[in-house]
Image: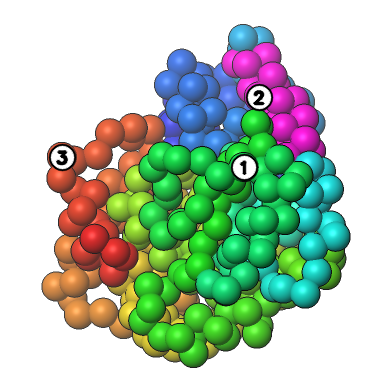
Amino acid sequence: MTSLIDTFRTLASFSPPKRSLKDAPWEDYVDWAIAQGLGPLAAYNLEYRLGGADAPAWARDRLLSVYQGSVNDNVLKLVNFKRAVDDFEGKRALVLGGAAFAEALYPHVAFRPVIDLELLLRPEDVGPLSTHLSAVRFLPQKGELPPGAIRDLFDGNTHLYLYAELLGGRSREEESALFDRALPMRVYGPSFFRLELEDAILVTCLSHAREGYRIPLLSLVDLRELLRGAPDVSGPYSRPVDFALLRQRAKAWRIDRALYASTAIVARLFPDAQAAAEQAQPTLRPATKRLLDRWVVEPLSTVGRVTSVRGSDRLRRLLAGGRT
């Protein structure tokens, strides 16, 4: 009998092994995978890498519809964003999350759904970019913001969240260095950049902690590919990670626990990334590791889990070093 985790690993791989998935737990997998952002990649693997893998027609049809929707939605969002910012010059904005990863980590942009757009700016540049975007119908919204975001702009289809800092004021020099090390994203014009590789890994782990590890597994696929140095594509993240530098920056940012927790989850979920994930892990006290393993790593490594322990989100933020 094919287990849920075997189904997940096969269909979340960029090079899935040829096999039959006839006896996979499709009733448990399909809706869960879609909710985790894994539907498009799973659909592609089933249809084009595994020849259907003996999966039931209803499961293939459901996943394929998500794949087709992801293609159209990603193209619409990213093209509209490009049109909105292409002539914005004189500042430096860092594209975060899915919009920075979709074509840099994944063999096809449709594999990685881009739900929202996120930008990091220097505080003095938030106003000028907001004004520019308001002129092209990205209008300010009221309501709850993601952790750390200071502004929500919406064009009727896509939320664009603006951040003025990521490190919580812990180090102005470290914050400024993110901009200095950033890599150009010329497709969006001269003012747009993405985090360099080690920074992208650390910011991903920090975002996990600030969300209390209530995250879709898609974000752990992002982290898997960052840690592996994006070997399945040829792009800005396709190089070996400097793990010593990574651990050094994690210590300077005071996010050792977040780096440990997120990479330990990746090591458990993805055997092909285990070696890289373990190389990334900082040295922690045994008692701290036991707490992280119990309250963060083990629950997040349980494939199919959709609920969390009552009150555990705040504890996870505390343990992992995120804001409370």
Mark 3, residue position: 310
Which stretch is magenta? Answer: 59-77
In magenta segment, residue 88: no
Tag 1, which secondary structure?
strand
Q: In this view, does 88 lie above or below 19?
A: below
Above or below 162: residue 109: above
Give, as a three-letter code, the residue at label 3: Arg
Badge 2: few (under 14), some or many (20 or more) residues near its Cα, within 10 Å?
many
The answer to whether residue 250 is left or right of residue 59 is left
Q: Residue 35 at x, y = what percent? A: 49, 30
Residue 244 can be seen, yes or no: no
Q: Position of residue 18 (x, y in %)?
A: 69, 36
| Mark 3 surroundings within 10 Å by alpha-carbon count, few (fewer than 14), some (14 through 19), many (20 or more) | few
Q: Distance between the residues labelled 2 and 1?
A: 28 Å
Question: For the view shown, which residue lies furthest in the top direction?
Answer: 58
What residue did someone put label 1 on? 139
